[in-house]
Image: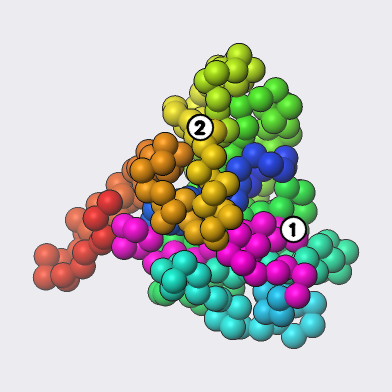
Amino acid sequence: METWTITNQKGGVGKTTSVVSLAGLLSARGYRVLMVDIDPQGSLTSYFGMDPETIEASAYNLFPVKQPKKIKDMIVSVESGELSLIPASTVLVTLERSMVGKDGMGLVLSNALTSVRDQFDYVLIDTSPALGILMINAIASCQQLLVPVQTEYLAIKGLERMMRTLSMVAKSRSSALRTVVVPTMFDRRTQASVKGLRVLRNTYRDSVWPSFIPVDTRFRDASDAGQTPYKFGPDARGVRAYASLLKHLLAPVEQDDDVAASELSAQSGMTKPNV
């Protein structure tokens, strides 16, 4: 099971759009996908028609505030059963206060996900823009980190803080963390967007994805319909851009799979979905 965390300390940069877009594309390729919403604002949860204010079993119940529930009790089916989701509750915002001083709280999500590793191929985590116990849990759980960044000045300035945070967290990990900066909301008609993309590429050339996600009103239409962008409009330019991003993200994963497969017996009969 491969886990990807989509995060940024600035809101409104396309985190939830990235989660639902990539999840829909992975599902269309035959992968079993679990989305996890640990943002107290619950944008991903709301996307699929659930209310973070009233939902009972949510990611909050993973944490030992009282008696934690089993992770399987929080998973709901969305997208006509093609995707799975652990929704968020607004009560997640209280965790920062209640978890202070408790040992091992940064690994709660990672430990919980181990119990479903045989049920899913990919886990995509949508995070809060605030640095705290929730973001630390998300980063500690993943093998690949995606940082969507709007191609405009303030968002790029905010990325400096995010990259410093990632550098600190990476030092505490036992394994390397693949990080990909994803330029989003690019509008080639504006000089600000063109300049922003150039700055991103020049400043973070080793981490930034070479292409970009364009501004596309179909993302908003898909959200209004409660469908992943791929399901709503597979030919939309934004969906095509995310398909290109997915190909980029899967490259190192597929290389690892190929190495592992070469070590298996020819009689094992193991296969993986075509991408």
Quarter that holds the N terminus: bottom left
Please give the name of the residue rendered at 47% of the width and 51% of the height, measured from the top-left corner. 229
The percent position of residue 204, horizontal first and vertical second, equals 56, 25
The percent position of residue 82, horizontal first and vertical second, equals 41, 69
Residue 73, image quadrant: bottom right
In the rendered picture of this protein, how many numbered marks are placed on residues?
Answer: 2
Does 125 sit above or below residue 56?
A: above
Could you tell me if residue 77 is visible in this image? yes
Stretch in magenta: 27-54
Does 108 sit above or below residue 210?
A: below
Query: SS class of the residue under badge 1?
Result: loop
Report if residue 46 lies within the magenta region.
yes
Left or right: where 8 falls relative to 35 = right
Kind of residue at badge 2: Pro
Report if residue 234 lies within the magenta region.
no
Please give the name of the residue rendered at 65% of the width and 69% of the height, measured from the top-left corner. 50
Q: Residues within 10 Å of mark 2 (few under 14, many from 20)?
A: many
Query: SS class of the residue under badge 2?
Result: loop
Kind of residue at badge 1: Gln
Distance (Cα) linking label 2 and label 1? 25 Å
Please give the name of the residue rendered at 50% of the width and 32% of the height, measured from the top-left corner. 214
Pointer 2 or 1: first along the chain: 1
Q: Residues within 10 Å of mark 1 (few under 14, many from 20)?
A: many
Q: Which residue is mark 2?
A: 214
Mark 2 or mark 1, which is nearer to you?
2
Residue 242, image quadrant: top left
Q: Which mark is residue 41?
A: 1
Could you tell me if residue 138 is visible in this image? no
Q: Which mark is residue 273?
A: none
